[in-house]
Image (cartoon, rainbow, N blue to C red):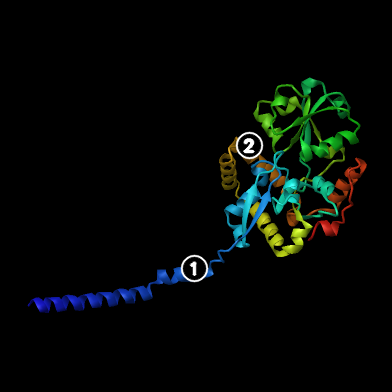
């Protein structure tokens, strides 16, 4: 009896194992998973660094979303996004080999371009001037000439070069007060005017309680300074070594921007996360404002996102030439590769 039971159990276990083996071979879920695994791109990604022009904020939302949504990865890139600003100027990071890509103002790139270290504009992200000078009407300032002898806050180093050229071209002899990123000197009347970006500091001034009608605004575009700002750059040497990589980086970045502008709520959440991860003060409404203003600059010409207009390059060269800062004239076709 005991032998018969043992034999029956053995047969049952063999049968059960056979059935499980059959189920495993015919499972549709496992077949789909196997096919999906075969379609996954290679895990090896080329590591590169992208130094943004300033601190983390919605001004660079396209880069964050290109990384967040996997666009960089789809093009075989593992991109580290690094803060710039006064403590890490993008051009210095590029020339010192601390980054492969960076964002800079067009006029900054044209001024820094030289035969020993020529630059390539991969994408002119911003298509419109964003620089203003803002003051309180209570100062009595009504026109540019009223700035003579006044205290004007201007960003340090390359971030504020174009403002200094603007004042010089208009024969303004103001007392320049170096600024970092705060608007506190302006709010506390320690300066009479300050340079702002229309998508950033101007709104922060409004958020502090000022009304637009309380302010006097000089838009540099109204005075022949319609300078486009944020562009994405690399060195010519790096481009020659890695042309496809540079093109793929550019494609992914632009795809990131298109996604960011089409999904503002999702994007602002990502921006705020980046800011908080880097211990920066983050205000959701302010970042939303910034992203909306960036839309106007990036989509100035919706059919040519990332395009550098030859006239914009010519204007930057003309301003630098007037100020004795154009050491090396730029050939458009060598500077911007379409």
Q: In which quarter of the image is residue 162?
A: top right
The image shows a total of numbered marks equal to 2
- Is residue 297 something that shows in the picture? no
**Disc number at residue 37?**
1
Percent of width and height locating residue 219: 80, 36
* Quadrant of the image containing the N terminus: bottom left
Q: Give the labeled residue for mark 2.
A: 286
Real-space Cα separation, disc 1 to disc 2, in angstroms: 42 Å
Q: Residue at x 17, y 75 (%)?
A: 9
* Quadrant of the image containing the C terminus: bottom right
Q: In which quarter of the image is residue 163?
A: top right
Q: Is 259 positioned to the left or the right of 105 in the image?
A: left
- What secondary structure is marked by label 1? helix
Percent of width and height locating residue 24: 35, 73
From the viewer's perspective, is the residue at label 1 or at label 2 nearer? 1
- What secondary structure is marked by label 2? helix
Q: Which residue is drawn at 57% across and 47% down?
A: 266
Closer to us: 311 or 179: 179
Residue projecting furthest to the front? 96
């Amino acid at each position: 009896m005991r032998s018969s039971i043992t034999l029956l159990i053995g047969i049952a276990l063999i049968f059960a194992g056979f059935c499980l083996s059959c189920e495993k071979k015919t499972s549709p879920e496992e077949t789909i998973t196997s096919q999906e695994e075969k379609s996954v791109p290679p895990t090896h990604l080329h590591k590169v660094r992208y130094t943004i022009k300033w601190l983390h904020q919605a001004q660079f939302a396209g880069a964050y979303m290109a990384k967040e949504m996997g666009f960089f990865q789809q093009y075989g890139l593992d991109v580290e996004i690094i803060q710039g600003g006064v403590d890490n100027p993008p051009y210095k990071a590029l020339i010192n080999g601390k980054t492969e890509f960076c964002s800079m103002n067009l006029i900054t790139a044209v001024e820094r371009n030289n035969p020993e270290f020529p630059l390539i504009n991969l994408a002119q992200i911003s298509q419109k001037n964003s620089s203003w000078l803002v003051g309180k009407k209570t100062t009595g300032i009504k026109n540019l000439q009223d700035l003579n002898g006044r205290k004007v806050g201007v960003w340090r180093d390359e971030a504020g070069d174009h403002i200094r050229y603007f004042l010089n071209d208009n024969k303004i002899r103001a007392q320049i007060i170096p600024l970092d990123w705060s608007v506190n000197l302006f709010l506390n009347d320690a300066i009479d005017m300050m340079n702002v970006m229309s998508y950033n500091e101007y709104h922060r001034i409004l958020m502090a309680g000022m009304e637009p009608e309380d302010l006097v605004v000089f838009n540099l575009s109204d005075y022949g300074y319609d300078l486009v700002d944020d562009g994405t750059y690399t060195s010519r040497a790096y481009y020659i070594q890695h042309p496809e990589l540079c093109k793929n980086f550019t494609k992914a970045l632009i795809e990131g921007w298109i996604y960011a502008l089409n999904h503002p709520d999702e994007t602002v959440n990502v921006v705020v996360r980046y800011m908080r991860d880097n211990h920066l003060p983050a205000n959701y409404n302010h970042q939303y404002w910034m992203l909306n203003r960036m839309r106007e600059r990036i989509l100035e010409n919706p059919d040519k996102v990332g395009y550098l207009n030859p006239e914009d390059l010519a204007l930057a060269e003309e301003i630098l030439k007037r100020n004795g800062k154009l050491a090396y004239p730029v050939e458009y076709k060598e500077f911007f590769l379409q």
